[in-house]
Image: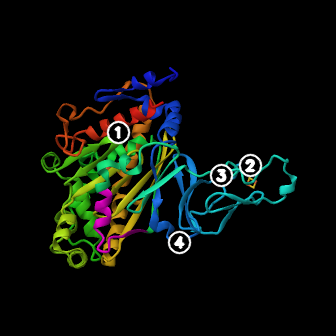
Amino acid sequence: MPLDNAADISTLVQPGRVHRRVYGDPEIFELEMEQIFGRVWIYVGHESQIRNPGDFVTTRLGRRPMVLTRHTDGEIHVIHNQCAHRGAMVVAEDAGNADEFVCCYHGWTYDTTGKLIRVPLQHGYPSHFDPDDPDTAMVRAPRVDSYRGFIFASLAKDGPSLTDFLGYMTTSFDDMVDRAPDGEIEIAGGVFKHAFDGNWKLYLENLCDAAHPLFVHQSSIEAASEQDDGAHSDGAGEIAVRQMRQNGAPYKMWQEQIGIWTYPNGHSFLGDYHDDEKLVAAKRNKVFTEYIAAMETKKGKEETKRVLEVTRWNSNIYPNISFMSQFRQFRVVHPVSVNRTEVFNYMFRMKGAPEKMFEDTVAFSNVTNGTGSLVLTDDLETYGRIGVGVNSGGAEWIEIGRGYETDSPDSHGGVQGKDSTSEVYIRNMYDAWLGYMTAA
Ligand code: FES
Ligand SMILES: [Fe+2]
């Protein structure tokens, strides 16, 4: 059935279930690239990646390659990585510093706002050719804004402001930044990249799924249970063992101690998963003690206590980022095609914190988000199996109804699941999805 209008799309999302076509239909994927990734605020990078004039990083808006730049006047721009001559991608490096971008094909040259500044053999073009025409450029995203260093862009000229779009989820970004004694964080280390044969929506649908670790991650849970607490003297082993064991927490804990909160525009977070006692052994850990001392010196005891009492696990900003502040992990989901997705994992260093804490961040990434992670690889296998299943015909409907009758309003304008095993956060994403997909 071709999708002719909003009414057809609306039939795909029903109370507590969605049609499998949303994961496997190329026509729906094309519409998502237009209606979601082509319009809403999409994360494109962090200010620490482009500190100085001329700094740039390549990024994406959906499938569209973009360049995030800081111009000589300090302004930030997000420009389409596409030459206005015959369409070649202009910037091939991941990051760097440049006064201008020169296309490799015929040498058309652009400044860091995307404006065309030089055209070899210009006299050969027809008289109506105007290099100053704003469309003859590496075209800029019309809206760029940032919240506490996190930069977003939108391809829509109009729409809600970034802070309206983020809503109450701004508090998750605050949590990420406020944990730094100097009040600043920076992207550091490398980027872990991975990919799977499945739809992009599967990724965020898994990151607040409290019902899966006990099954999906069983092998590493069992291996971790057999290890000594002090495995590996550099602490990396301890981080791995703690996380893997935590994945094996019984359902009772997920139901009694952990919550799931959702907010407008598809956002959500899993809360109270780890307090710092469980994850980094706060009281016994020398580095953490030094960190708390640095926090108290810079921010005072009361503010330090307030900051460290926030125990959010993954915060998901729909449609494509998921981050957690306790180990400064930040994942960006890039749709490639209807059944192919790439994910980039970045790590943040907290200014003013002991350097060992960043080493722990890298160690944690290796455990949970690294390409060779014993945890991530389980999830990738699962996404691939879903990719096979939803594209194989058979049952029409995918169930997302767990906890449906026990969702309740929260005090910040969102909806809360009864406990963390509720699929309320997936239903919430589909509310946003439907709104975007059927918007005029
Ligand atoms: S395609 Fe870029 S200069 Fe020709
Ligand atoms: Fe998982």
Circle 3 residue = 82
Which circle's residue, 3 or 4, is located before the other in the chain?
4
Estimate the spatial distance between the alpha carbons at disc 3 and disc 4, rounded to whole Å: 23 Å
Q: Is residue 330 left or right of residue 251?
A: right
- Mark 3: give few (<14), some (14-19) or many (20+) Cα within 10 Å: many
Between circles 4 and 2, the one closer to the viewer is: 4
Circle 1 residue = 429
Q: CB under 8 Å between callouts 4 and 1?
A: no
Question: Is the C-beta of the residue carrying label 2 under 8 Å from the nearest atom of ligand 1?
Answer: yes
Q: What secondary structure is marked by label 3? A: loop
Between circles 4 and 1, the one closer to the viewer is: 4
Q: Is residue 281 among the parts visible in the rendering?
A: no
Between circles 3 and 4, the one closer to the viewer is: 4
Which circle's residue, 1 or 3, is located before the other in the chain?
3
Residues in magenta? 172-187
Estimate the spatial distance between the alpha carbons at disc 4 and disc 1, rounded to whole Å: 37 Å
Q: CB under 8 Å between callouts 2 and 1?
A: no
Residue visible at 36% across and 46% down?
204
